[in-house]
Image (cartoon, rainbow, N blue to C red):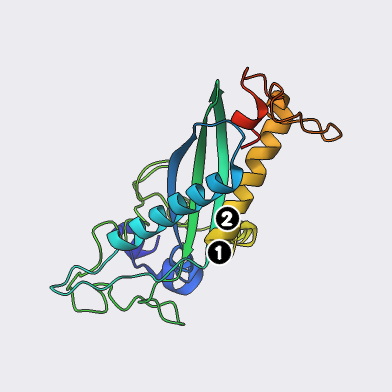
Amino acid sequence: MNKNIENNSFFSEICINQCKGMCCDPWWGIIAFTVIKKDGFSRMNSFKNDVIKEIRARAERIRERYVTNEVSPRRLFKEPERYNVKVEDVKFNDQSIMISLRAMFAFRCLFLSEEKTCAIHPAALEGNDIRPQHCGFMGSIDARLGEKGYCRIIHAAGASSDDANALASAIAFERDVSEKCFNEGAASIEKAGEAVIEEVKSCFLKHTGHFMPAANKESPGRNEPCFCGSGKKYKKCHGQ
């Protein structure tokens, strides 16, 4: 077994020479949150702007958290290169809708060189660790799937030190997952917000058709009952 792995090194030869810093290139910031829409399916353009605002706030929260531990802190990330935001669940009650989202932001670390070397790692700074508190937890051989610090690649290297194929398979799997998430993501927050709205609409069409008018049905008159069954006039409900 590699000596660095035995010592739980977070900057092992596996990371540098074989994985090549995959977990930092890109570095994925993942956060789950919920948005609530209180007026049914009306005013979706306004709601899209609310969703975009919430996505931007989460990305900025990550950027603010990941700064160097210095007198004058430096941020590790610029704006994300990719926004992969998925609807995980939709629950509704009367006109209130609760939408659970999972956002994945693909950041490029400003301290990772083209050679995949970390410029602020203690190994490069003679033991001086100025990394953010939550940076560099990947790679613990003791961590298990779902636990903090778990890395499938390091785990494969430690559990199958004599099986090069096992390590290669683990690296290929992680690379495929990262590339898939990156390619499925949007290039801007606006596009990510639009994708969320389309996914919500699809969910409503599939499970709660009464929230939307039939495709071939004309909208009711402004003073007629709204199609959604709220009991309100159309002009006071979805006709706003």
Q: Residues within 10 Å of mark 2 (few under 14, many from 20)?
A: many
Asked if residue 52 shows in the view, the reply is yes
Q: Is residue 91 left or right of residue 216?
A: left
Q: Position of residue 39 (x, y in %)?
A: 54, 31
**Residue with the most extreme right position:** 216
The image quadrant that residue 126 belongs to is bottom left
Which of the two residues, 39 or 145, is positioned nearer the viewer here?
Answer: 39
210 over 155 or under it: above or below: above
Which element is circle 1 on? loop
Which image quadrant: the C terminus?
top right
Residue 7 percent location from the top left of the image:
28, 59
Name the foreground residue: 40 vs 138. 40
190 relative to 72, above or below = above
On the rendered image, what quadrant is the N terminus found in?
bottom left
The residue labelled by disc 2 is: 192
Q: Are marks 1 and 2 in contact (CB under 8 Å)?
A: yes
**Residue labelled with disc 1:** 188
